[in-house]
Amino acid sequence: MSKPARFLTFKCAKCAKPVKVTLQQASACSHILPYQGICACGEIKRYATGNPDAVKAFVESNELHSHHHH
């Protein structure tokens, strides 16, 4: 299994400039890889790969990483 990319680049939803997101400290669970970065305009960009429900919860959350098992 290959290692995930440490940096990814996306277009900012607010100003359309490229924003680099960094792989966050991987959580204890391996089904989500969270990325986060801040654009020059101040907009926070979140991205994640993995379990669709966990990814959706992470991207929609306002905290750095609020992922919990129930």
Image (spheres, helix red, strand yellow):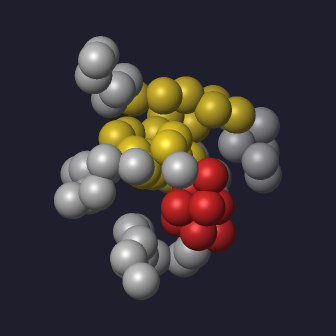
User: Is residue 45 rendered to the left or right of residue 12?
Assistant: left
Q: Quadrant of the N terminus?
A: top left
User: Is residue 48 rendered to the left or right of residue 28?
Assistant: right
Q: Position of residue 18 (x, y in %)?
A: 63, 30
Q: Residue at x 38, y 76 (%)?
A: 69
Q: Residue at x 70, y 42 (%)?
A: 12
Q: Position of residue 30 (x, y in %)?
A: 31, 48
Would you say residue 38 is visible in this rendering?
Answer: yes
- The residue at the far front in this view is 70
Residue 40 vertical position relative to residue 53 in the rendered view, above or below: above
Q: Position of residue 47 (x, y in %)?
A: 55, 47
**Numbered-mark total:** 0
Front residue of this view, candidates 24 and 55: 55
Residue 46 vertical position relative to residue 53 in the rendered view, above or below: above
Q: Residue at x 57, y 37 (%)?
A: 19
Would you say residue 42 is visible in this rendering?
Answer: no
- The part of the image, by quadrant, that contains residue 9 is top right
Q: Position of residue 6 (x, y in %)?
A: 32, 29
Q: Quadrant of the C terminus?
A: bottom left
Residue 32 vertical position relative to residue 10 in the rendered view, above or below: below
Q: Residue at x 77, y 47 (%)?
A: 13
User: Is residue 35 rendered to the left or right of residue 12?
Assistant: left
- The residue at the far bottom in this view is 70
Front residue of this view, candidates 24 and 27: 27
Front residue of this view, candidates 47 and 44: 47
